[in-house]
Amino acid sequence: MESNKINLGKGFVEVYNFGEIKLHAYQTNDLMNDDCFILENDNNLLLLELPAFHSNLGEFEKYVKGLNKTIEGKVFSDHPNGGDTIFTDVKNYASQGTVNSMNHGTIRHLVDGFIPAFGEDFDEKLPEITDILSKETENIGGFELKIKYHDENIEIEFPQINVVYTHMLGHDVHSIVPGKEAVDATITQLESYLDKGYTLVLSSHYTPETLDDVRTKIEYLKDVNNFAEESNSCDEFKAKVLGKYGNYGGENYLDMTAGGFFPEK
């Protein structure tokens, strides 16, 4: 699908027009390559994830305000940072799993590590969640959400535009899949995207991707499983993956995967 690119300064927005709804995908160009999203209909806006760095928050806030529509909510799954800094009078939506993760789970541990790693530009504040998501279907401001709940995050299908949101895809970036069970679960998840024929797949660390990108990722994940079965050590496994996918980004993600398949004894 064609998009219109708008440079904001540090980051840029790609706008996809689905008719009654527009999707604005903001690529932050921050240290984590975060993406966040804006859904727009005739009257309202819905924000999905927010920038985590102060150097992005200002231009993102200015862009959203320039759309001149009511913000019906901010929805968080994996990246709640920034949610307590801009648009503080707007409702914050998240699952109980995300709330738990913010308090004492993966999100909390990551934020604690990011604070010294990224310095003052990182927005360490986490928002108070005003509305807990618990239903399989929600309608916020005229935007339909079909939600799949996981332990610490959610997947969201937006049936009006045939788009799905998940935490990570990245067809040319290594994945964090620490073990065969995680790989198999991710393959099953991505194969369901093919079955449903989504127009775009949104994720927190990549611009919107297509089903061809999903197919590419599935082949990568199958290779990860095969390379793990053929390897006797973490280093051997990494060498096999890099031998075929040496041009992929996110080698630190591969390190996490390798550590999951070959934990230190």
Image (cartoon, rainbow, N blue to C red):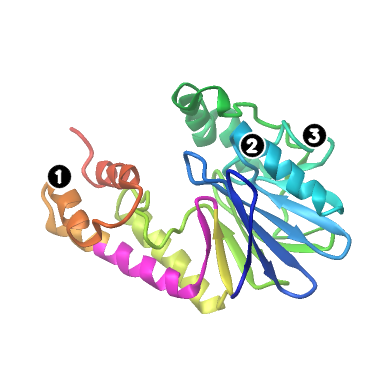
Residue 109 in percent (x, y) is at: 48, 29
Q: Which is more N-terminal, label 2 or label 3?
A: 3
Q: Amino acid at mark 1?
A: Asp
Q: What kind of element bears circle 1? A: helix
Q: Is residue 216 magenta?
A: yes
Contact (Cβ within 8 Å) of mark 1 with mark 3: no
Q: What kind of element bears circle 2? A: helix
The span from disc 1 to disc 3 (Cα, nearest Å) is 47 Å
Which residue position is annotated with label 1?
235
Which residue position is annotated with label 3?
88
The span from disc 3 to disc 2 (Cα, nearest Å) is 17 Å
The quadrant in which residue 170 appears is bottom left
Residue 205 in percent (x, y) is at: 50, 51
Q: State the mark number for residue 99.
A: 2
Q: Nearer the viewer, residue 36 or 227?
A: 36
Q: Badge 1 local density, few (<14 within 10 Å), some, or many (20+)?
A: some
User: Which residues fall within the magenta stretch?
Assistant: 204-223
User: Is 170 left, or right, of 4 in this rendering?
Assistant: left
Q: Between tags 2 and 1, which lies in front?
A: 1
Q: Which is more N-terminal, label 3 or label 1?
A: 3
- Of the 4 image quadrants, the one containing the C terminus is top left
